């Protein structure tokens, strides 16, 4: 009888977890659809802006020469995620293997990553709480603001993010992405991956725009938005 009750309790807990996971999946799917519309519109704007502005004049598009780089490692706050955090940390160690650690600043997102990276001897430049499966702009903005400010001031040659790429409920894989500097190739690759956009959608002729207050001001806003999207 005790075993039967235990199995029943386990079944109820499992069912509850399935319902929660299903709800999160629906929210994540809706968020992805919303992001797709924004990303495609941003790409069209950038295509148009590239004809009217000098991209090399914007600090987020320039290649810095500081000899330093930053790596953002995104993990969870809790440990009930299978081997997810362990895989992310292995990817981080592989990415930094043989690199002079004095030239690297590590930014930890999530308590699990923060604790593990400290144990591994990394000096953390900054730490942030883990982001949810459907993060809001308000939650992302402090990290994005720091990332953008540090790059604009020329402190880093590049800023990378190591994160978990969602494939399915049972499958997530660690992935590396260069967040800054922004290049047309990287932006296109990110939009293709995030939106599953076709070449036809990305190559279609952009319409004519009248930019207010100026093309440079609009470019500034779009580029900052794209950095936030990548985080």
Image (cartoon, grey):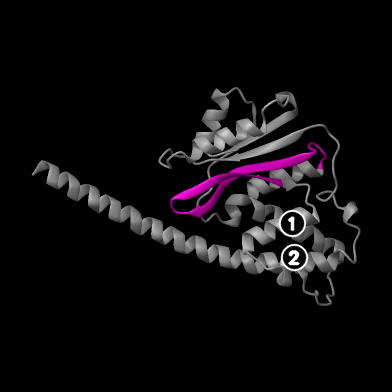
Q: Residues within 10 Å of mark 2 (few under 14, many from 20)?
A: many
Which of these two is toward me, 207 or 200? 200
Circles 2, 1 touching at the beta carbon (< 8 Å): yes
**156 is within the stretch colored magenta:** yes
- In-image side of 59 versus 176 (left or right): right
Return the x and y of residue 42 as percentages of the image width and height: 73, 65
| Circle 2 residue | 43
Q: Nearer the viewer, residue 96 or 69?
A: 96
- Looking at the image, residue 85 lies above or below residue 165: above
Residue 187 numbered mark, or none: 1
Image location (x, y in percent) of residue 77: 48, 40
Count the labels in the image: 2
Residue 79 bears which disc, if any? none
**In this rendering, does residue 87 appear at all?**
yes
Residue 111 appears in the figure: no
Residue at point 41% right, 61% down? Answer: 23
Q: Main secondary structure of the magenta part?
A: strand
Residue 184: x, y in percent? 80, 56
Up/down of 99 relative to 179, above or below:
above
The quadrant the N terminus occupies is top left
* Rendered residue at 54%/34% (across/down): 113
> What element does badge 1 sit on?
helix
Q: Tell whether position 218 is magenta.
A: no
Tell me the element at label 2.
helix
Q: Quadrant of residue 46?
A: bottom right
Magenta residues span 153-178
Where is residue 214 shown, x and y percent of the image? 86, 66
């Amino acid at each position: 009888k005790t075993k039967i009750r235990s199995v029943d309790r386990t079944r109820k807990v499992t069912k509850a977890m399935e319902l929660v996971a299903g709800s999160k999946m629906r929210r994540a799917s809706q968020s992805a659809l919303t992001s797709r519309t924004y990303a495609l519109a941003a790409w069209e704007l950038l295509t148009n802006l590239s004809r009217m502005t000098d991209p090399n004049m914007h600090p987020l598009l320039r290649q810095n020469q500081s000899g330093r780089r930053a790596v953002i490692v995104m993990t969870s706050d809790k440990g009930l995620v299978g081997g997810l955090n362990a895989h992310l940390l292995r990817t981080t160690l592989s990415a930094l293997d043989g690199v002079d650690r004095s030239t690297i600043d590590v930014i930890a997102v999530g308590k699990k990553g923060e604790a593990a990276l400290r144990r591994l001897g990394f000096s953390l430049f900054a730490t942030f709480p883990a982001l949810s499966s459907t993060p809001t702009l308000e939650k992302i903005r402090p990290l994005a603001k720091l990332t953008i400010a540090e790059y604009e001031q020329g402190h880093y040659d590049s800023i990378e993010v190591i994160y978990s790429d969602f494939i399915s409920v049972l499958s997530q894989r660690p992935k590396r992405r260069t967040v800054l500097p922004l290049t047309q190739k990287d932006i296109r690759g990110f939009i293709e991956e995030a939106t599953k956009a076709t070449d036809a959608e990305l190559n279609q002729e952009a319409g004519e725009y009248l930019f207010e207050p100026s093309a440079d001001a609009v470019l500034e806003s779009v580029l900052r938005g794209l950095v936030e999207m990548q985080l």
